[in-house]
Amino acid sequence: MVKLNKIYTRTGDSGTTGLGDGGRRLKSDPRVEAYGTVDEANACIGLARLHTLAAHPELDAMLGRVQNDLFDLGADLCTPDTGKPLDYEPLRIIAAQTARVETEIDTLNKNLKPLRSFVLPGGTPAAAALHLARTVSRRAERMMVALAQVEGEHVNPEAIRYINRVSDLLFVAGRAVNDNGEADVLWVPGQNR
């Protein structure tokens, strides 16, 4: 269990931070950048929830579950799998979490009209906030994929699948809060030439 008695420790003043396995990395390390961006996506979802709480309670509950999972994802990323045994079982994203998000995407998507163009972020404040969260989630995904390519680094493949699905959920959620796609702002190629 996490216990935070003191918020500042001064251990990061040198530009390093502690990982879940006790190791230290630069705050600019690709692993730290990846889980920091997951945290940023989580904050964006929190902002979006200000617009979904009352008007879209079922969606808001989905987003709350995703926020909790994103902390699991951060824990997964901050505890590198080095193949060495740890004194505890590290928290890892599992397939059931990804499957749940897929089911929630299907639930939201069944009421949406098919797309005939790309959707511009906007429409309602909730949709704009969800699209912002989606783009930050996609950046986290790119960082996780890049981290997985670094020699000596390992990223849980299910974690990459999970963040990919979260981005998809946020896209569909953005459409759902736009009157199930009726209020979507569609891209018109070359409109302003």
Image: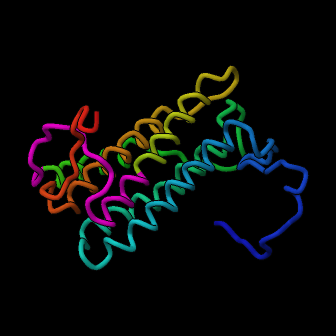
Give x and y (percent) for residue 101.
31, 50
Total count of labels: 0
Q: Residue 131 lies in magenta, yes or no?
A: yes
Residue sitting at the far bottom: 54
Q: Which residues are magenta?
A: 110-133
Question: Is 73 on the left-hand or right-hand side of 172?
Answer: right
- Quadrant for the N terminus, please: bottom right
- Quadrant for the C terminus, please: top left
Coloring applied to the structure: rainbow
Q: Residue at x 52, y 62 (%)?
A: 43
Question: Is 127 on the left-hand or right-hand side of 107?
Answer: right
Question: Where on the picture, by quarter, is residue 66?
Answer: bottom left
Q: Residue at x 74, y 46 (%)?
A: 21
Q: Residue at x 23, y 37 (%)?
A: 191
Give x and y (percent) for residue 15.
85, 49
Work out whether residue 137 or residue 62 is closer to the camera in this orientation and state it: 137
Q: Residue at x 53, y 45 (%)?
A: 92
Residue sitting at the far front: 193
> Where 146 falls versus 65 (above or below)?
above
Give x and y (percent) for residue 141.
49, 38
Give x and y (percent) for residue 165.
35, 42
Q: Residue 149 lies in magenta, yes or no?
A: no
Question: Where on the picture, by quarter, is residue 127?
Answer: bottom left
Work out whether residue 149 or residue 28 is closer to the camera in this orientation and state it: 28
